[in-house]
Image: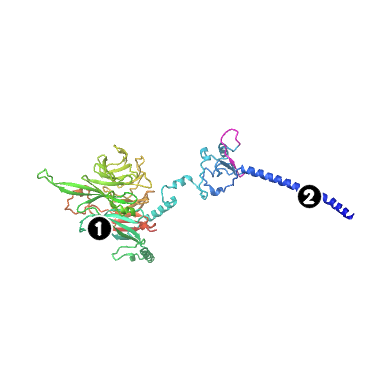
């Protein structure tokens, strides 16, 4: 009885408890199903809704004034969005798809609506720039441009690093040139492998890397085999760190003690080679001729990337008896020769093997006087300036033809880089431009106010800019793209009346140097036109200048050194010896190289 009662009591008490638990468990299961269903729906909608994260706009976008910075901060705009096709609302911090323009579109959903919102908010930017002018660079850039036109103006085309680096380098070199000293740092005596001395320099140039110096000098005394002649010498420029450190310490001690006389050598010459430059002769001597043969013109001719040649013209006059005239005086005959020779200048190993090729070793003769030369690497053509015309020689095919110069003497000439345009500097006439693609009537224009131009140089960094120097002592810059007036004139202090004076443009085309009739070397900036330096040559041969006609008319018994006034030659590089920062101005005076180190 007791057991039955107890079991019944237990059943009566446990029944309601189990029922409440079942009800709670059923409620929990139903809630779980509802949550699972809602979660599934949310995932379903999330799969069909783009998931965008708010970008970090400060580090992703270049803020352009007038386009983005002027946009109101609380207005929905396409410029604030980094997602194409979406606008961003900074108030709601959400992205909205931009719809096509049309009736019935929600406010702020089309480009037209966004432009209207910007105009109402005070942004007066034009519609064409409001939605498409925002420039976005890579994500790692964060540049704040304060003035977009000035920023774009500072950008310069061409290799060589950033524009800021190039400008800084130019400013440093300009400052160095402004403080150049009149007294050379040291001098180097030029001598060939035979040990002969040289009296005057007729040509001077330096490679782009500053490792090779090439020049043409007239021998001072008779050579055993050739006699008086002009020889082409190449020098390898290297840096001796021991010499550089030693002379730098000597200079520092002399400046501290105030005794600059301690820097003089045994000959009383100032010598302080702080760069440690050494000029080693390279076995590449070329003899241009003997006796009364004179050098007319000489230019570098880069035939290809492996071989660089030297193009030069020489002339020799002699008496010739007239066979059919009895008792008549002999007449003077002039014979000119144009030569193309390979040299040790930017020469690669592949080019060294092909230096003996007939393409790099050619010569042409002419009975007509020659005044100037130029070479074009693109078409392998040579222009020979003569008295009343110019002659074009094709090195590869051997063909040649004449182009007119208006009956004027062609005292200078230069090809454009592509070889399609030829510029002729004519005596007592302006520079003429010829289109070499024409079969006839090549002349297409003239450069006004450019009479008797004896020097021309086309800039490689600015292919449409031409630098000229004429017999009036004026150095001008021209834009050859149809303009007939000069861009700038750099004639301050320069003197020239009737000579083809030496001029030099550095490899970076930042400066131009010219030698005046007063034997003074002046340098200008090609960017600003400022006169930066003026260095007077300490010694030159003071002889009466002889014209080209007078030199040709002299007989073989006359003195062979008939080059007239020996003007100094100039070369500049900011990386002598291949080391950046070794900036120096070198003057070739007589048989010496005067090195002016440009120290900071």
Q: Of residues 323 and 174, which is closer to you in this image?
A: 323
Q: Is residue 355 magenta?
A: no
Q: Of residues 499 and 202, which is closer to you in this image?
A: 202
- Badge 1: how crowded within 10 Å, few (<14), some, or many (20+)? many
The C terminus lies in which quarter of the figure? bottom left
Q: Is residue 573 left or right of residue 292?
A: right
Magenta-tinted stretch = 92-106
Q: Is residue 374 visible?
A: yes
Extreme residue toward the right, this view: 1
Q: Secondary structure at mark 1?
A: strand
First reached walking from the N terminus: tag 2 or tag 1: 2
Residue at 48 percent across and 45 percent down: it is 148
412 shown above or below 213 = above
Q: Of residues 205 and 348, which is closer to you in this image?
A: 348
Residue at 64 percent across and 44 percent down: it is 43
Numbered tag placed on residue 264 in the rendering: none
Q: Look at discs 2 and 1 and give the one toward the viewer.
A: 2
| Residue assigned mark 2 | 21
Extreme residue toward the left, this view: 326
Q: Is residue 348 visible?
A: no
Numbered tag placed on residue 198 in the rendering: 1
Mark 2–mark 1 Cα distance, whole angstroms, equals 120 Å
Q: Is residue 98 magenta?
A: yes
Report how many numbered discs are placed on residues in the image. 2
Majority SS type along the magenta span: loop
Residue 558, position as x, y percentages in the image = 17, 53
Residue 372, position as x, y percentages in the image = 27, 46
Quadrant of res 382: top left
Residue 406, position as x, y percentages in the image = 26, 39
The N terminus lies in which quarter of the figure? bottom right
Q: Secondary structure at mark 2?
A: helix
């Amino acid at each position: 009885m007791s057991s039955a009662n107890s079991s019944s009591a237990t059943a009566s008490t446990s029944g309601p408890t189990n029922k409440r638990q079942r009800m709670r468990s059923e409620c929990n299961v139903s809630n779980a199903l509802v949550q699972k269903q809602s979660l599934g729906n949310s995932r379903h909608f999330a799969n069909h809704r783009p998931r965008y994260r708010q970008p970090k706009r400060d580090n992703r976008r270049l803020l352009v004034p007038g386009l983005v910075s002027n946009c109101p901060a609380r207005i929905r705009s396409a410029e604030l969005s980094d997602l194409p096709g979406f606008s961003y609302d900074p108030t709601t911090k959400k992205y909205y798809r931009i719809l096509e323009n049309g009736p019935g579109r929600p406010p702020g959903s089309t480009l037209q609506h966004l432009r209207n919102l910007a105009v109402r908010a005070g942004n007066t930017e034009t519609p064409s720039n409001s939605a498409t002018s925002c420039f976005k660079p890579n994500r790692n850039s964060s540049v704040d441009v304060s003035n977009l036109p000035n920023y774009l103006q500072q950008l310069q085309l061409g290799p060589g690093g950033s524009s800021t680096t190039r400008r800084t380098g130019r400013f440093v070199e300009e400052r160095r040139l402004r403080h150049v000293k009149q007294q050379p740092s040291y001098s180097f005596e030029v001598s060939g492998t035979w040990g002969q001395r040289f009296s005057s320099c007729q040509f001077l140039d330096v490679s782009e890397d500053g490792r090779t110096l090439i020049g043409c000098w007239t021998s001072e005394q008779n050579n055993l085999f050739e006699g008086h002649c002009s020889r082409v010498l190449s020098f390898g420029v290297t840096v001796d760190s021991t010499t550089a450190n030693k002379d730098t310490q000597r200079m520092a001690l002399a400046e501290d003690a105030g005794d600059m006389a301690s820097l003089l050598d045994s000959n009383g010459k100032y010598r302080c080679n702080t760069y440690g430059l050494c000029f080693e002769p390279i076995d590449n001597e070329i003899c241009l001729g003997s006796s009364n043969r004179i050098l007319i013109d000489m230019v570098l001719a880069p035939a290809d990337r492996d071989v660089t040649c030297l193009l030069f013209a020489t002339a020799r006059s002699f008496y010739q008896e007239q066979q059919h005239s009895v008792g008549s005086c002999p007449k003077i005959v002039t014979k000119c020769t144009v030569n193309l020779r390979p040299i040790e200048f930017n020469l690669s190993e592949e080019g060294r093997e092909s230096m003996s090729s007939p393409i790099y070793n050619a010569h042409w003769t002419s009975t007509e006087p020659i005044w100037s030369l130029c070479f074009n690497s693109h078409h392998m053509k040579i222009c020979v300036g003569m008295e009343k015309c110019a002659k074009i020689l094709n090195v590869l095919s051997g063909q040649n033809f004449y182009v007119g110069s208006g009956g004027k003497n062609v005292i200078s000439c230069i090809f454009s880089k592509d070889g399609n345009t030829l510029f002729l500097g004519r005596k007592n006439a302006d520079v003429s431009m010829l289109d070499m693609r024409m079969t006839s009537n090549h002349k297409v224009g003239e450069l006004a106010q450019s009479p008797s131009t004896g020097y021309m140089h086309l800039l490689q960094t600015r292919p449409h800019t031409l630098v000229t120097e004429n017999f009036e002592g004026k150095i001008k810059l021209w834009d050859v793209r149809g303009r007939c007036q000069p861009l700038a004139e750099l004639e301050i202090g320069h003197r020239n009346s009737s000579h083809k004076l030496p001029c030099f443009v550095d490899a970076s085309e930042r400066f131009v140097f010219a030698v005046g009739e007063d034997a003074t070397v002046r340098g200008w900036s090609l960017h600003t036109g400022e006169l930066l330096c003026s260095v007077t040559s300490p010694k030159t041969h003071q002889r009466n200048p002889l014209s080209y006609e007078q030199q040709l008319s002299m007989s073989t018994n006359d003195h062979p050194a008939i080059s007239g006034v020996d003007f100094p030659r100039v070369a500049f590089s900011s990386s002598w010896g291949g080391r950046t920062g070794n900036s120096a101005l070198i003057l070739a005076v007589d048989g010496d190289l005067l090195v002016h180190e440009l120290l900071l």
